[in-house]
Amino acid sequence: MNILIAGAGGIGGYFGGRLMEKGQKVTFLVRENRKKQLEKTDLVIESPHGNFTGKPDLITKDQRDQTYDAIIITTKAYHLEEVINDIKPFADESTLILPLLNGIAHMEPLIEAFGERVIGGLCFIETTLNAEGHVIQSSPIHDLVYGERDGSPSERIMKLQEAFEGAHAGFTLSENIMQDMWHKYSFITAMSGITTLMRSPIGPAVKLPAARQTLERLLHEISAVMHAIDAPIAEGLPDMQMAKMEEMKDEMKSSMLRDMEKGLQTETSHLQGWLLGKGKENGLETPVLEAAFAHVKIYESLKS
């Protein structure tokens, strides 16, 4: 299988590098500056699971040489419209489109653009790029979950599974990927919401009573909105998510908090903002969600 990865940042660089490490054919679609950087340094991963350095195959959007069997989208959600346009020339009628973007709002425009070629996907990983452009994995979780949106064991998904098999990361085929995606959406919306609101790693947010109470309210608000729009979430999801956060290392930060600390754009409109809009459409009061969203939007307005 010939795989194109849109983006070679913390997510695309990590999972693409692990596929390269096992000998899988991978090409990275990158911007010119990142291409020049990787041509100079190679793709370098520094990880608790072992380091990797390899020479990646790189193209830019103007190098339209072929189509690919699968395209994995690893860019930030706010680049969605741009990346859809960028990957169209590299996709034919049989190309699988696997998005690893946060949230759920990206699925509708992707399906509108590519139809049934779009499958479900998500990842759990804490990575960033250092000043040299190396991919730095700062915690041991490195899971990528994917599957047909209807859960079927299709021939094409089996081929993708074969391409992923043996890579030194948690590539997992799911029969319930849409619920998995909604559950991750709930988790990261709450975690990014509380850590940015408190400007703190997850530890104090879970352990300090006042912060924990705020987090509990946020988790329940998120689940209430998801129930109102008939999202396929499990009963008792807020308690499940809180238990997961309690298991995390105290120093864990959301990617949104790290983006704020670096003075970068955030995905709050795609995460908290989209869900806040759905809550208002259904007449729900979501004060903690609204406060979390407002906090980050104020940061963005002062930054610009």
Image: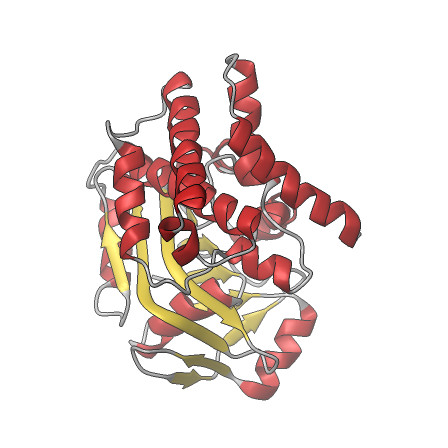
Residue 240 spot, x, y in % from top left: 25, 40
The quadrant holding residue 138 is bottom left
The scheme the figure's colours follow is: secondary structure
The quadrant holding residue 170 is bottom left
Q: Residue at x 38, y 29 (%)?
A: 220
* 15 over 198 or under it: above or below: below
Q: Is residue 25 visible?
A: no
Total tally of numbered discs in the picture? 0
Q: Residue at x 52, y 60 (%)?
A: 66
* 178 over 232 or under it: above or below: below
Identify which residue, 120 or 261, lies in the foreground.
261
* 60 over 176 or under it: above or below: below
Q: Residue at x 48, y 56 (%)?
A: 254
Asked if residue 288 lies left or right of residue 22, the reply is: right
Asked if residue 249 lies left or right of residue 174, the reply is: right
Residue 5 spot, x, y in % from top left: 48, 61
* 247 over 31 or under it: above or below: above
Residue 174 spot, x, y in % from top left: 23, 45
Q: Is residue 272 visible?
A: yes
Seen from this angle, which residue lies furthest top? 283
Seen from this angle, which residue lies furthest front? 209
Identify which residue, 134 or 12, lies in the foreground.
134
The quadrant holding residue 118 is top left
Residue 257 spot, x, y in % from top left: 55, 56
Identify which residue, 122 or 127, lies in the foreground.
127
Image quarter hosting the N terminus = bottom left
Asked if residue 129 lies left or right of residue 16, the reply is: right
